[in-house]
Image: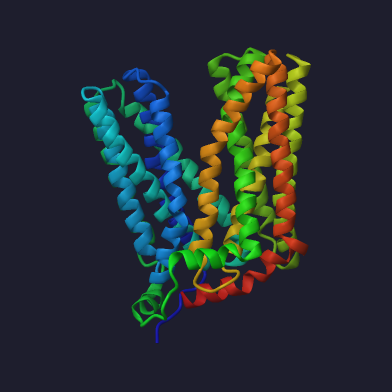
Amino acid sequence: MTTAPAPLTWLGIARLGCVQAALGAIVVLTTSTLNRVMVVELALPAIVPGSLVALHYIAQVLRPRLGYGSDTGGRRTPWIIGGMALLTAGGIGAAGATVLMATHLAAGIALALLAFLAVGIGVGASGTSLLVLLAKRVAPARRAPAATIVWLMMIAGIAITATIGGKLLQPFSPERLMAVATVVAIAALLMTLLAVWGMEGTAALAAATAPAAPQPRFMTALGEVWREAQARRFAIFVFVSMLGYSAQELVLEPFAGAVFGLAPGESTRLTGLQHGGVLAGMLLVAFGGSLAGEFRAKAMRAWTMGGCAASALALLVLAAGGLAGPGFPLQPAVFVLGAANGAFAVSAIGAMMGLAGQGRESREGVRMGLWGAAQALAFGLGGLFGTGASDVARAVLGAPDLAYAAVFCAEAVIFLAAAWLAASVFQSGGAVRSASAPAIAAAQVN
């Protein structure tokens, strides 16, 4: 008889957080560094990298199918490693495609399409199974802090890679770009292998090798999950809330420059201040979410709804501030917006861990994939919505302060809708609480 692993310790949670850091390290090279190289060094139209980044989000609509694959196999580790291997190949291929564009544009773009498609599928396969593994192995009282740790480690992976990679790329050359991308990608893969080693235990291996009951087809399994009212409502909530979250990101710096006259360096520091607020909001929820029992379930609901409502209020304040003019305290308002964003985001991730085990058994991967696909679609559309709405508003209203005020008000309405949807997901605060027992059981038999 195999020994079931205990719920993850803080060290175990940090180990799995290393996988998220590895994901962030490769993704930031493909979506940020290569974006800049294509536009600046290669003088290509911005639509080229923009379309490639959008493709990597579109590919993540496959997350439910990838999660279904891990459900039928019974183990998450092979999908985490396989996804990271595909992501590694995609990251190196994207760098090679960028280099190739300098001499053979059409061939470089064709290779880039394949590479960014691999990046999107790799992120979907690895990220979905990672969240399922966390949901099954993290004790309920630790879900909010665990979500914060994993999110912060992803940010750390992005920040460290961007900082060190930026220095190593100077002076820029195609050879340096390939070398840096290759080293980062391979290091991320090796870190993932070390992080997931032994994390599922012998019980999961025995369960995966035992004769399994016949599984329904993917579309049948997806239909079963979609018919679960709570899973469907949460997917819609994720899409709406992340649409509002991503829409504001590409609007904030142009708003600061056009309305308040901030220089590029000053607006960049403003974005840094917003991210500092996100960190503060996440840490606040991490401590608040550590409380046990009935209050913890109610607190998770309150943080999710309150974070969305506070984000809406902060956006309305920014809209009014743009109309007020230079005397408005822009920096504090942006920090509060970031804190509200961080509060709702990390509480939603913590709730996601609890809700993954609700409903029909052996569908955790499909549920997590459904929610991940909703998030990817929201991020892909959010930037288009924010920038497109600001262009339309400026064309109609003329004055930039009125245009950005209209955009911020529209985004506030989105967040208010998200708060209302969160209330329907956590009816009477019982959803997260009732998920606790199944989650513990799953961790004990995994």
For this rendering, which residue is in front, 435 or 203? Answer: 435
Is the residue 348 above or below the residue 113 in the image?
below
Give how far across and how far down residue 434 sits, in percent. 67, 71
In the picture provided, is 319 more to the left or to the right than 32?
Answer: right
Give how far across and how far down residue 34 sits, in percent. 36, 30
In the picture provided, is 130 more to the left or to the right than 381?
Answer: left
Q: Which residue is drawn at the image coordinates 47% and 41% (left, top)?
A: 156
Q: Which residue is drawn at the image coordinates 69% and 51% (left, top)?
A: 304
Is the residue 103 above or below the residue 362 in the image?
above
Is the residue 129 above or below the residue 216 in the image?
above
Q: Which residue is drawn at the image coordinates 62% and 23% (left, top)?
A: 390
Q: Is residue 420 visible?
A: yes
In the picture provided, is 123 more to the left or to the right than 398?
Answer: left
Please give the count of numbered marks on the rendered protein.
Answer: 0
Give the quarter of the image for residue 339.
top right
For this rendering, which residue is in front, 385 or 416? Answer: 385
Q: Is residue 177 visible?
A: no
Give how far across and how far down residue 384 sits, in percent. 54, 31
Q: Could you tell me which quadrant the N terminus lies in? A: bottom left
Give how far across and how far down residue 162 sits, in percent. 41, 33
